[in-house]
Amino acid sequence: MVSRQVAARGIRDPAVLSAMRAVPRDAFVPEALVEFAYEDSPLPIEEGQTISQPYIVAAMIAALAPKPGDRVLEIGTGSGYAAAVLSRIVSHVYTIERHAALARGAEERFRRLRYHNITVMVGDGTLGWPEHAPFEGIVAAAGGLEAPPALLAQLPIGGRLVIPLGPTPREQELLLITRTGAEQYRREELGRVRFVPLIGAAGWNESEGPPAAPLPAAAPLLRPTAVISLLREAGEPIENIDSAPIEGLLDRIGDARLVLLGEASHGTAEFYQMRARITRALIEQKGFTVVALESDWPDAARVNRYIGQLPPARTRAAAFARFPTWMWRNAEFGSFVEWLRAWNGERQDPERRVKLHGLDLYSLSASIEAVLSYLDSVDPGTAAVARERYGCLTPWERDPAVYGRLALTGRYRSCEAPAVEMLTDLLKRRLEYAAEDGDRFFDAAENARLVVDAERYYRRMYYGSVESWNLRDTHMFETLQRLVAFHGPDCRAVVWEHNSHVGDASATELGAMGEHNIGQLCRQSYGPAAYLVGFGTDHGTVAAASEWDGPMERMRVRPAHAASYESLFHATEVAAFLLPLRDPWRDAVREELSPPRLERAIGVIYRPDTELESHYFEAELPRQFDEYCWFDETRAVTPLSSPAPAAGEPDTYPFGV
């Protein structure tokens, strides 16, 4: 963690690096989240608070420039992690926590770890701790509107305060404030951050909290009435999905080779139905022959055999049987599958028949099974070698995340080499195998590639969420590239994935954090030949779970946040419409929508009570998508009966989108 997430990102202070290595972060997170303790991300703790990501803790402490004889005040003890790190550097740490339960838990951890130079108080951190002042350094783990005067007063000349400040919890700047004189302070900006609100007499009001987030401070104030009128004029109304006129959309798609269709949740009926409507038109009128899904390759392969009216493959696993089963096992997608089967049955020309494929990489055990099944039928000798090589991964079929953790810590050997060797050997004999049946060989090779990337993914998921996210979306993009190449130079493909994958990540705050996605990679490689369509809604119901691996619930979607794109579209009072963004009716559409706003993303988990922090991010919609499809009120998908998942089938934790 320290090498990859702290030192590699520019923290050079040897005292800080040594302290970060000395303090076990897993001792300061909830037991259920211990396996993610060393990820480069914040984690939830009790009382609705968070433990900051390791890099932020290190950066804030490094900005204090602490010395061994210093006395430091911390505002917001939380679980106690930052105070523990500080205690390995300075003489004494005083820390204030407003939640008594958190303070008690932190004190217990300090006793257990024998950190005896930390004193905890339950109280209002915005008032500081005058009895022990002055402090050479003060660090606040909560964001306020302005620096509390009491904290500034408790600094000596040369003392430093590190604190996040901003008009809302989403618009905070981490500041280093140095006292240079009796009433003089120097401020330095350290970068954008997001912390829980600083509650207290000199902070936000506890009962009300921060005000609703306004538009981002850097954006010019929009003219809501003018924008709403413009959207009403520019949007193409949708009165009925099945009969909606989409000729304008097809014209705008033009000769694009890839059309990526998003969704703002994994459980909204209208999103599935409209994607099916658009996809049918692309197949019928523009000759598209590939549909690629945010699903596992073996599951989609079974559906592909069904729509191709081929005998089912022999496999122990049911398709789409693991959590979240409703994502593809629903009536809306089922109707589209039946349409594909009927379409293919009426096509005499095999080149006009549609193929359906999965792009995701979670099917480690099912893909191993598919490779072995293929080799058993074409080369039993190589199948025996494959079983020996894949045997390294066999003990972890039920929980490959455990394999990733053990391999990373050196308690179990890495299975990367045998997995890569198997793929290499398979590809070396591609001409021999493909001569027998090119489609079957392609399927086996993709499963072998998936095993390689899945093995790497489950190891890298502990390096940080950005790295594992990027590996996953790169795998999906490269799989899509191979699909298009395999099906010929005239192949055109439709992709169904969540907005967070389909929309260009470089136009979002997630891109600023280093994430990329399949939409961004498609634009970089295909340019205007990739057409990205986003979807959104204001309110209604959605199929989702409250926690990972929990039962599906029909949940109420809250009306959109006032500072969001969704709220703006809701204000048009138009029930549904298509909005061109790449080539809008008037350039003013792009101009007025370009200043960043919030955008909502609901995955398979939905937590309405923490919706602003859990489900919103900032984006520039006209750069993110080429088209936007709006449904003001939506309803949950209709789930189909789900078989029990086969033994050894992993789930997609920790990603809910």
Image (tube, helix red, strand yellow):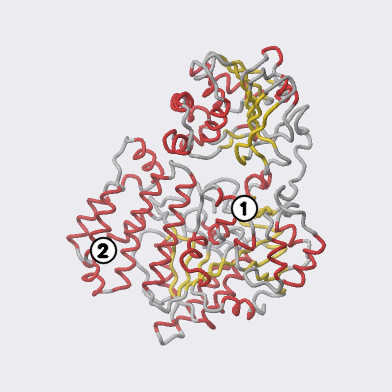
Quadrant in the rendering for residue 444? bottom left
Q: Which residue is mark 1?
A: 553
For disc 2, the marked residue is 427
Left or right: 412, with 88 as reference point: left
Residue 446: percent from the left, percent from the top?
A: 35, 63
SS for callout 1: strand
**Quarter in which the C terminus is drawn:** bottom right
Q: What is the CA distance from the residue labelled 2 to the residue labelled 1?
A: 44 Å
Label 2 or label 1, whichever lies nearer to me, is 2
- Secondary element at tag 2: helix
For the view shown, which residue lies furthest in the right direction? 225
Could you say which quadrant of the image residue 370 lies in?
Answer: bottom left
Inspect the image, locate mark 2, and give the three-letter code of the amino acid beneath it.
Leu
Q: Residue at x 48, y 19 (%)?
A: 113
Contact between marks 2 and 1 (CB within 8 A): the answer is no
At 36% from the left and 59% from the top, the residue drawn is 316
Q: Nearer the viewer, residue 630 or 337?
A: 630
| Marked residue nearer the N-terminal end (2 or 1) | 2
Residue at position x 71%, y 67% from top?
Answer: 589
